[in-house]
Structures are given as C-alpha cells and as structure tokens.
Amino acid sequence: MNPLIGVTTSEVRRAERTHPLDEGEPQQHEMALGMPYVRAIARAGGVPVVLPPLPQAAVRSLLAPLAGICLSGGPDLDPAAYGASPSPDLGPIEPALDRFELAVARHADALGLPILGICRGAQALNVARGGTLHQHLPAVTDNSIDHRQTAPGWTETHHVEVAPASRLASILGTRTLGANSFHHQAVAALGSGLHAVAWAQDGTIEAIEGDGERFVLGVQWHAETLDQPEGPHVRLFEALVRAASEQQVPLAA
C-alpha cells in the first residue's frame, strides 16, 4: 500500500485579496497549496494528504493515519514562536497557522514519523525543535546571493555545498547542486537534535537534518519545483516516501 504523506498548507489568501464569483460565497480567507508538492510526492510513490490548519487539539487525530509529513513553504514565521522581537523587515505572518504547523512537527516527532521540510517548512522544523531564525538575510549576509529570486521556480540561481558524510549527500548522490531561492529568512541557532548539512556560498544554512536513523530533513530551496526525473531533487521525495513505507502500519479494513 502506498504510504499516506501529510502536506501542510501554509499559503493564506486573505479575504480582501480574493475574487469570489458573483454566485459564490462571500469573501473569506482561503488556504492554498502549490500542486508541485502533490505531484512530487505522488511521483515518488506516496499518496499526498493535504492537512487543513485545524485547532491544535485535532492534530493527534489528523496525523493518526499518516506515515510521513511534508512541511511546505509559506509566509514568515512569527518570531514570538522562538522568543524574538519582530524585525522591521518581517513579512506578513499568520501566528495561528504557525501554532498548528509547529504542533504538527512536534507530534510527528513524538510519533517517530519521517519529516521533510521545504523552505518555510525547514524553518518550522527548526523552530519546533527550539531553534531560531534569521529574520532578514540581507542584514546578516554579504548580499552576494539573491535569496529572493525573480526567475521561475524551476530555475536554479545559486549553488549549495553539502556536507560529505551527511544523510542529505547520500540521498542526493552529490555534494554540490544548484538550487532555487524564494526566502529572506533562514535557520540561525539550530534546534535540538538538528545539525546543518548544506550551505549557500554566503554561509546561509541551506539544509538541516536530524541525528539518528530516522528521516528528518529540511531544505531551504523549493525542491518540489525542481523534481526532474533523474535529477537530485526528486530523490528527496523518494527518500521521504521510502522512509514512510518502512514506517506505515496497515490501515484497518
């Protein structure tokens, strides 16, 4: 049986920016998930299950049938989640959404589920483990790399160097790869049981992974839009699905 992989929905379309049909419902907040996440997981052999941002009390039931988690990209995390004051350069935040996704990450940890974080998802994984973030990279780097590219998501705009003895290097089959970049925040202090395993040329942490044998990995780039057959990025989703296949328990008939 193909494993069920839960995917968080982090993009919020606020009511004032939606354009409902005349015969439809009144304007309201909406959640959106880019289809590349769904396609990447499905191509790797998993069954993507989109997770709605429900109250935290529902997280246990929501994750019960799942064999793995993908934490998707989205808006800036509220710095209050890691005990920091907001930077003047902080973008729009959704604190209620943060609380839900951090609860998902922590409960997935408690269940021993494999986790793959993408962009914001990698940051959420780090914060869920007690880590912190750089709120605005231009304030802490030499600005030699544009981490908020304007080129399409399938375009690689900078290189990433991967630690040779890492799980990530083993999965990707390479120590150097091209990546896209759609963020202005990144991992600062590492969370418990996590270590940095890839870096951009300006020193920005581009990937983190967990200690031990369980698949716990976060990448700062949007691998879901770079998952070309035979390319290194697709292997991230294949590794997640493979770990989930080993994790899953048969569902009751």
Image (tube, grey):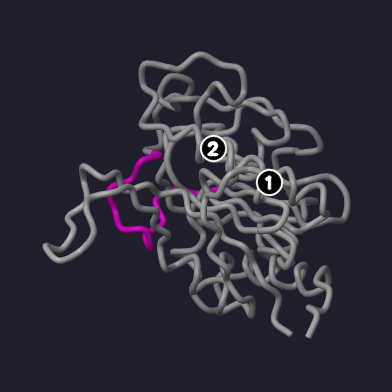
For label 2, the residue is 98
| Residue 12 spot, x, y in % from top left | 37, 47
The numbered dot on residue 105 is 1
Q: Main secondary structure of the magenta part?
A: loop
Range of magenta residues: 147-160
Split into 4 quadrants, where in the image is the N terminus?
bottom right
In this orientation, which residue lies closer to the viewer: 137 or 52?
A: 52
**Is 147 displayed left or right of 70 in the figure?**
left
In this orientation, which residue lies closer to the viewer: 26 or 160?
A: 26
Q: Which SS class for mark 1?
A: helix
Q: Residue at x 49, y 63 (%)?
A: 224
**Is 152 placed above or below 135 here?**
below
Residue 157 is inside the magenta segment:
yes
Q: CA distance from mark 2 to mark 1?
A: 10 Å
Identify the image quadrant of residue 14: top left
| Residue 57 spot, x, y in % from top left | 67, 45
Residue type at mark 1? Ala
Identify the image quadrant of residue 68: bottom right
